[in-house]
Image: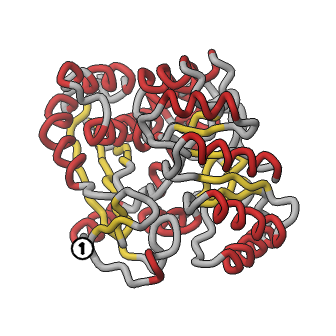
Amino acid sequence: MMRVREVHTHVLKLRTDQAYLGPKRDGGTIGDGYEVREPWRSLYSSRYETLLVEVIADDGTTGWGEALAPVAPEVPAAIVNLLLAPVLVGMDATAPRPAWHRLRDLMRERGHLVGHQADALAAVDIALWDLVGRLTGLRVAQLLGGAFRTRLPTYVSGLPRSTDAERAALARDWVDQGATAVKLHLGHGVAADLATVDAVAHAAPGLRIAVDGHWAYGVDEAVALACGLAERGAWFLEAPLAPEDVAGHAELAARSTVPIAVGEALRNRYEFAQWLDARALRIAQPDVARTGITEAMAIAELCAARHVPVAPHHSVGMGVSLAAGLHVAAAVADLTAFEYQPTSTEVGARILTEPVPMHPAAFDLPAGPGLGVNVDAETVRALAKES
């Protein structure tokens, strides 16, 4: 039996000219720390931060995983080092699902199925699937039962400019490059959001437009926004209400003809089951760097049983989580689209020997064994040391 010999964590904090998700708050300069960018409520970093996990088998074969950890990646790194790695070492390197169950249960009865514990487990799980693929010569989508598609439709996520005119011009540029859909990161008020949609639609007729509300609205405002989006033929409305408001999203979903999309804050099948049972979402958006591959597939099967399509979320993860998300997207029967974050894709390629092949309208499924991407280990170690 091939066993896990070593587990290593690498915390990266990479500088880039473009900040996460959109324009800098009030057009000002972002410092080295974290900040809240109004009207959004979450902390953001001026750098691209992530956690990479390296799992090594007895024969030296290495699998790589990544957690979506855009703020304080040191926290899930500590969880991997202190809680997960000591249990994982010595386990069967070719059995990611049993490993996931064993590692999940370590803190389960203490209520740690979500948050940083889940992020840490996701990174380890992705690394194990990559490792199995490299040991067997199969790509992850094959290990998951086969790919329904090898070309994965996508949409451009975000038009990071400060004014509607600038966003409209950027949308036009993306259309000229072949993009067919875009998601706007809004939440600035119903009137302002609809004005942005109008500006982009006018500049890029035929472009499919979705809106991310960034949890900014109450039910009545969200209904008004959804009605306005429906009149404009919008694609979907993502995360409009507070992330814990299942009942509110259910009410909104019942009143809206625009599909309501939710999922980036959810970590496991139990959370998704609650939302699905409540009919609180019409498009599910699990993020593999927060769920892991094992749990993402369980979530996808739950969605299939409720006839809810899947549109995997992808944020500021590097090339490892991008590849993992693409393999899950390939293995999901009812796929809406996969999220394309231009800047994080570009930054994430810094840790790979070759970038993930893509086009503004579609990604090609990486073809090599495991995740199909090769991590430049020397670069990762150098960047981790700098970070």
Q: Which residue is mark 1?
A: 386
Color encoding of the figure: secondary structure
Q: Residue at x 21, y 55 (%)?
A: 74
Residue 302 seen in the current view: yes
Residue at 53% of width from left, 62% of height from top? Answer: 345
| Left or right: residue 86 compared with residue 221 | left
Above or below 73: residue 288: above
Residue 131's place in the image compared with 381, above or below, is: above
Q: How many marks?
A: 1
**Between 307 and 119, which is closer to the camera in this rendering?**
307
Quarter placement of the C terminus: bottom left
For this orientation, the residue located farthest to the front is 220
Q: Can residue 358 be seen by looking at this rendering? A: no
Which of these two is toward me, 232 or 122? 232
In-image side of 316 versus 168 (left or right): left
Q: Nearer the viewer, residue 210 or 68?
A: 210
Q: Residues within 10 Å of mark 1 (few under 14, many from 20)?
A: few
Measured from the top left, where is residue 28 in percent x and y?
41, 84
Q: Circle 1 sits in a helix, a strand or a loop, which is it? A: helix
Q: Residue 3: x and y, percent?
A: 26, 29
Q: Residue at x 67, y 30 (%)?
A: 309
Of 330 and 138, the residue lying toward us? 330
Residue 119 location, x and y as percent?
33, 41
Image quadrant where residue 174 sits: bottom right
Pick the quarter of the image with the N terminus: top left
Q: Is residue 345 above or below residue 167?
A: above
For badge 1, the amino acid type reads Glu
Measuring 15% from the left and 35% from the top, which residue is drawn there? Answer: 83
Residue 321 on image: x %, y %: 46, 49
Q: Is residue 242 left or right of residue 377?
A: right
